[in-house]
Image (spheres, helix red, strand yellow):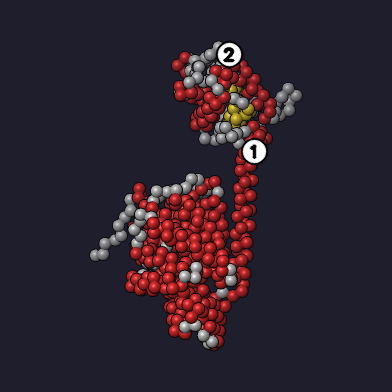
Amino acid sequence: MTPGPARVPAGDLQAALDRLLALSDREDAAEFVGALDEADPALEAAPEPRWVAWRHALTARRWLAEDDPDAARAEVSAAREVLERCPGSAETALTLAYLSHVEVTADHVDAAMLLAIDASLLAEGPAAGTPSRQLHQAHFWLSLTLTGLDLEELAVAHALRAHAVAEELPDVGDQWRMLLLAAQQHVELAQTVARRNDGEQAKELAAVALASATEARALDWEPEPKEQDLLDVVQTWALTCLGELDDALGPLRRVRKSIARDGGIWLRGYGDLALARLLARLTARDDDEEQAEETIDLLVDAAGAFAAVGDRRRYRQCLLELGQACATLHRPAEALHWLEAYRADTGRAHARGRELWAEMFVQRSRLREAERQAAVLRRHALEDPLTGLGNRRSAERRLGSMRLGGEPLSLAVVDVDRFKEVNDDTSHTHGDAVLRRVADLLREHSRTDDEVYRWAGDEFLVVLPTATEDQAVGVMERLRAAVAEASWGDLQLSGPVTVSVGVATSPAVTEDDDGAPIGWRTLFDTADLHLFSAKRSGRNRVRAHGPAPQPPTDEQGGASA
């Protein structure tokens, strides 16, 4: 009997994910599928939304490996739905970037672009947080996706960001791979820029690629043979773009032999394409027909390799360059054949679509950023910056939306006793620390549906929906005791911190003297009067409309006169 795949313990899920991400960018789909089979039981058992999203994302990659793009698209949609419930973070940005690469690999260009935009906004915004492996991986997958979308300038930008993040991390292997990515993206952009007849900029980009490759070699890291071969190809390609053709030819032929022996299909195609471009330049310089014939043969082989692995972008590049090479040899029929194939796979609308998508990417990013900033401003307008509670404006808006009558509603006004003495005896910094801790205690000991606001200064408001007066008094007595019993020694205060509380309840008081229904302001004023009564009665106590409860004992915090 053939043994089943090994199982991954739930605690090792992150390590399993890191391995699956590394395998996702390699040609051996069987190795990825095997690793996913090992991780599947642990992924299935993990209920957190982030792992549910990753399970769908990785399954989408499996379906691509099994040549079922429609099933992959369904998994991407499921992952996207789960991510709507996840907070903005570097982890979420990475998942979105990975999904966008799945979609571009499936040639779902529109879906890939939309996902890439959302991933880019998160990866470049404050939600991404400090440098982390998730953040540099997010930029890595975004760079690969944008390359597939022919947005090479943006791909280079994200490769550089990935490298900058990796430099802040301890893993030398990550730094090496990001330098390889930066070198590769720069040399590919150099090729594109050269095709636009901007030779100077092409050389500048190629110089950056060469510097990145040299920096990678200087690191104390032993890459895998395939990664080393790819770096060698990129470095010789950079020399080609710099015009150092003779220096590049020998090393590139040597690495191509290594790739032919040990490399996968895509890497063989990549090496063939790089050598074909070098020989095309030598042909133009030396007018060597033999080199021209070899160029055509290499481009045919490269096109076949890229078609086999689904790299449509580089497949199209090979078709275009085959047409150009045949035209150079004065073979118009062959040139037209390759150019017609290129036109059929690309077309003007396709090229124009890329330009429009690039423009939309920038515009939508700016729009999303404006929306994010507007949301931040709205939050700041309704949030107390010191405690993180809703501020008075937020409380008034909430109370104004509530209708009194029917179900009970209680308000509690909470005031820190002798707070002025805290500021006078210590400092305003200590006073701020007291307010933050009181706010935390009020939040912690409130009921699930209760709402806590900072009303003004050292005064807080607690809204207790559906709470009767007895229930509200019970809740506020618990909050009062939590403050009185809290440890304040680290702040070096002259005395303990306590609070006084006034409570009012509707519909316990539903009408004013004229028989009109009361509003929330009247309810608040009533609670404020009860707070005044609590202060006059000795502080550190709760007062409401009903009979006054017994003053707290010394063990409960003690009433201070």
Q: Is residue 155 above or below residue 438?
A: below
Q: Position of residue 452 (x, y in %)?
A: 57, 32
Label 2: few (<14), some (14–19) or many (≥20) C-alpha neighbours in 10 Å = some
The residue nearer to you, when weighing 159 against 443, is: 159
Residue at the far top in the pictured view: 561
Marks 1 & 2, CB-CB < 8 Å contact? no
* Frontmost residue, 451 versus 30: 30
Circle 2 residue: 537
The residue drawn where x is 57% and y is 18% is 424
The secondary structure type at the circle numbered 2 is loop
Query: Considering only vertical position in the picture, is 238 above or below 165?
Result: below
Q: Amino acid at mark 2?
A: Ser
**Spot occupied by residue 396 in the image (x, y as percentages of width and height):** 66, 33
Q: Quadrant of residue 513?
A: top right
Return the x and y of residue 242 as percentages of the image width and height.
50, 68
Q: Position of residue 541 (x, y in %)?
A: 54, 18
Say left or right for 310 vs 201.
left
Q: Which mark is residue 381?
A: 1
First in sequence: mark 1 or mark 2? 1
Is residue 101 visible in this depiction of the protein?
no
Viewer-nearest residue: 378 or 329? 329
Image quarter hosting the C terminus: top right
510 left or right, relative to 183 = right
Which residue lies at the image location 60% right of the left edge and 63% below the top edge?
357
Image-quadrant location for residue 4: bottom left
Secondary structure beneath dot 1 equals helix
